Amino acid sequence: MTLWLEREPSPYAAGRVFCLPHAGCGTSVFGAWPQERNSTEFLPVELPGRLSRFDNPMPDTFQELADAMIDGLWPYLDVPFALFGHCWSAYAAYEVAVRLERTGRPPASLFVSSQLAPQDGPVGRMLTMSDAELRAELEESIREQGNTPHPELVAIYLKILRTDVEVSRRYLVPDPVRLACPITAIGWSEDTEVRPEEMKGWAECGDTAFLVLPGWHHRFQDAPDELLETLQAGSKRE
């Protein structure tokens, strides 16, 4: 079993979707997601530096993170699979796809949610926030999920978030690699962080379909049927 997954993948899966959490978070953001749908597994990826992997430091760049992730997930790329990245982790998913295409084991699809294309980023409020502002952002997010922010836990997640923000700051890709696999750029109708119309640049990264789903920036956490159906279909695309 690899450190990168919270459970052992099924040997009987017809397809897999590797799901990457957004900045400052771990696999718990996919807690409402089913383990499988129509024989397609949804596999949350546990990134370094999170609660279960504090002993594994986060790499300095998305490119280095992608290299390490591929090493960890390689044994489980034996069936058709897709990559899903939301916001910050869309860049990690893209860099994984770039490298896998070079190895001859490309993903069936790349799904990027609520993020600008690589050549248009990095942008976002968090890039200019102080630690105090990031802490307030974390506390608000915790409350939105119906929980009470505890200072010690907030301090832990603040450290993770600050590290992730710095990784994003270093990501400068003016001339992105054009992928052979199809891309689906997913926007959210009520998203005030990244508006769906700001994602058009993904067309420069490959054959891209644009999909707008109802909801706000973190609506994906609720595992909406429209999203799961889209991912499930794309995981087995020929």
Image (tube, helix red, strand yellow):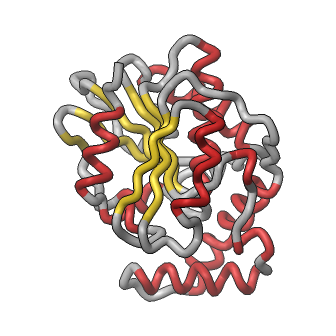
Question: Residue furthest toward the left?
Answer: 38
Quadrant placement of the N terminus: top left
Left or right: residue 6 compared with residue 152: left
**In-front residue for pair 155/168:** 168
- Is there any visible trace of residue 166 in the rendered image? yes
Front one among 227 and 148? 227
**Relative to 10, residue 57 above or below:** below
Residue visible at 35% across and 33% down? 234
On screen, 231 above or below 141? above
Q: Nearer the viewer, residue 57 or 103?
A: 103
Residue 57: image location, x then y, percent: 71, 49
Rendered view: 171 above or below 142: above
Q: Position of residue 232 (x, y in %)?
A: 28, 38
Q: Residue at x 48, y 30 (%)?
A: 182
Counting every numbered tag in the picture gives: 0
**Which residue corresponds to the image point at 31% horizontal and 65% vertical from the top-left?**
222
- Quadrant position of residue 199: bottom right
Q: Position of residue 82 (x, y in %)?
A: 42, 33
Q: Is residue 29 above or below residue 176?
A: below
Q: Position of residue 218 (x, y in %)?
A: 44, 68
Assign the C terminus to one quadrant of the image: top left
Residue at the outermost top position: 104
Q: Residue at x 65, y 37 (%)?
A: 204
Q: Is residue 208 left or right of residue 38?
A: right
170 sits to left or right of 204: right
Q: Is residue 51 visible?
A: no
